[in-house]
Amino acid sequence: MNKRDQMTGMADSGLEVIELGYYWNIVRRQIKKIIALSVVVTLISVLVVLAATPVYRSTVTMLIESEEAKILSIEEVYGLSSQSSEYLLTQFEILKSRDLARRVVERLGLVSEPEFNPYHPANKKSFSLRSLVFGESEPPTEAKIMDRTIDTFWHSVTISPVAKTQLVKISVDSKSPKLATKAANAFAFAYIESQMEAKIDVTQQASGLLSDRIGGIKARLEESEKKLQKYREEHNLVDLQGVSTLVSKEIEQITQNLVAARTKRIELEGAYKQVSSLQDKSYENLSSLPAIVNNPLVVRLRESETAAELKVSELSKRYGPLHPKMIAAQSDLDAVRESMHMQMTRIASSLENDYRVAQSKEKSLSQALEDAKQRASVLNRTEFQLNEYEREVESNRSLYETFFNRVRETAATGDMQAANARIIDPAVEPEVPVKPRKKLVVILAMVISGMFGVFLAFVFDALDATIKNAADVDRKIGSSLLSILPLVKRNKEDVPDGPDQRDSLVRAFAENTDGSFSEAFRTLRTSLTLAGLEHPANVLLVTSSVPGEGKTTTSTNLAEAFGQMEKTLLIDADMRRPTVAKKLALTGNGLGLSSAVAYPETLDECIHHVEELGIDVMSSGPVPPNPLELLASKNFRHLLDTLKERYQRIIIDSAPMHAVSDALYLSTLTDGVVYVVKADSTKDKLVKSGVDRLSDSNARLLGIALNQVDVEKEARYGDHYSSYGSTYNYITND
């Protein structure tokens, strides 16, 4: 952070401190009034508390528990769940209902209690006053009396759920501790009673609904049973399950036989086709067909043929073809072959017949399978419809049994319902009243009245449009403060009452009769001297907003202050109401400013030297008919230039800003303007308007001189200029 930022931060902090100090001073100014208001209000609150009738509060604690499984759950009938938070919230709202209040009012006879019945004869005075104000009214009806009593009692009841629990506290306020206790317990019992009645009503309603519905359910059951029985009779169904099983097994067996028959037919068909294709059924051709060769009989014959061939082969090695053994062996071989040829021819002839038989068997089995499937399909449809009827009967029977049991249970347990609430901690008679809380009321009255007093202090300060202190000069006017001129309190003998008697106040600085007063003007002198370092301010104009702000006293003492250091001239330019000569008790030829302007050769005669003050004074002289035209003349400007050559400092006492335009014009001819403001008197709008007019005329406003400030009073408020009364031993003269 650079130096410039640091300075800016310090300035901002200073502004905050000043604002806080300003508001604190407002409070300090009105502190006595604030304390007085607080004391009065507190005393009144004490009297009210002492006169107030004590109110007692009795509290009963009740548990609203969730319902557990019972013989009969009505909540299940209606689809409710007592475990939900909505259930507890509902019960809390029921506790707040006027119906419960009505039950308690009727049970305890609270209509006879003046506390709750506003129409009770004991409350006749209040109603008489009302009748005087609003006129006579018709006597209230019993219903209206009951309604008002219920309302009054209802507003005395407080329902307070305990957080995160199922507990609820019921409190009743009453002027009688015994009545409060009875009412609290009665309220809890009324809730439990209402819950019991509600459950009984719900049970009865449920029983009625179930009874109404069970008749229709029974009729549907009987109708479905009749349809089932009729269907069984029409289809002659004794054991449909057994029949279905037999049909299924039959289909399975036929399918197996059909597969075997089809296989056999395919085999025979192939062999039949091979035999049919032979033109010559010789031994060699037939022996080449697998269907014939593989015949068991042919296989045995081939074995015999093979043995005969082996025998012929062995004998041929030892004997010739004509040997008897060879002839015999060859003859056996031929015989075997002849027999095998005959057998093969017979087998070939029987293949066609076997094929036709296999073909017929396959067809027969296929038809049998189709018939079995047809029967199975019929059975399936019959079984499906039968199952539909049986399920309908079973569903109706189950529903009927459920409702029948529910009706029986409702009838048997309707009087066994229990409330979901019970009293945990019954109300006891209180010993200490809950209202009024005396200490709290008094403390609150004290605090609130004090805060209200502070608020009024700020309101009055905001409504006060006067300039009171240095802070107001900066905050309301926005101009620099040159000096604070203290209020000098004088006795009657100090105030001049004759034309030849001097005003001691205009000589206060020169005679140093008041240290604080003299020091204030030294401060003013110093401020003006510093203001003229860069731009000289030798000719100073002293003005104010309105008459009576002390501008003449200020200009005179300011001239005396400068007169101690340099040659100074005081000019009374207020030709409307000239007072300088009067206040200083000047005597002489009566010549002054008007004379010097009109007759420049009389200048020396127009200047009066006041030896004891150390200054020269030019009074206003004879009052001209047109003062502004005189001041706006060339002669005046020439006179002012001449005087600048003679004097180091010229102080001009002019007319007020808002009275005439003299000061506004003179401000353009001077080096600077000192604006005098009377503290606690001049409105800020007047001062701001005068300052703005000077600014519009391009006049050089040096600052504000705050006049007639009660420094003793301000010292008590802690203002920074309180040193006027302490450091300089300021003592007021009463």
Image (cartoon, rainbow, N blue to C red):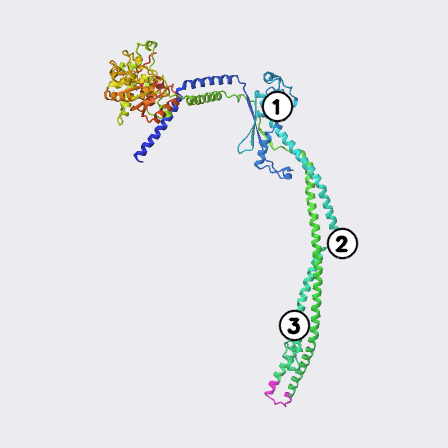
Q: Which residue is mark 2?
A: 234
Q: Which residue is mark 1?
A: 148
313 in magenta: yes
Residue 369, how many percent across, how many down? Answer: 70, 64
Q: Is residue 525 left or right of residue 142?
A: left
Segment colored magenta: 312-326
Q: Which residue is at the front of the view, 117 or 330?
A: 117
Q: Which residue is at the front of the view, 702 or 419?
A: 702
The picture quadrant where one finds residue 80 is top right
Vertically, is 182 above or below 92? above
Structural distance between the alpha carbons of marks 2 and 3: 48 Å
406 in magenta: no
Q: Which residue is mark 3?
A: 267
The amino acid type of the residue labelled 3 equals Glu
Which structural element holds mark 1? helix
First in sequence: mark 2 vs mark 3: 2
Q: Which residue is at the front of the view, 590 or 17?
A: 590
First in sequence: mark 1 vs mark 3: 1
Crowding at mark 2 (Cα within 10 Å: few <14, some 14-19, many 20+): few
Residue 590, how many percent across, how many down? Answer: 29, 12
First in sequence: mark 1 vs mark 2: 1
Structural distance between the alpha carbons of marks 1 and 3: 113 Å
Circles 1 and 3, Cβ within 8 Å, touching? The answer is: no
The picture quadrant where one finds residue 356 is bottom right
Q: Is residue 298 left or right of residue 675?
A: right
The amino acid type of the residue labelled 1 equals Arg
Circles 1 and 2, Cβ within 8 Å, touching? The answer is: no
The picture quadrant where one finds residue 593 is top left
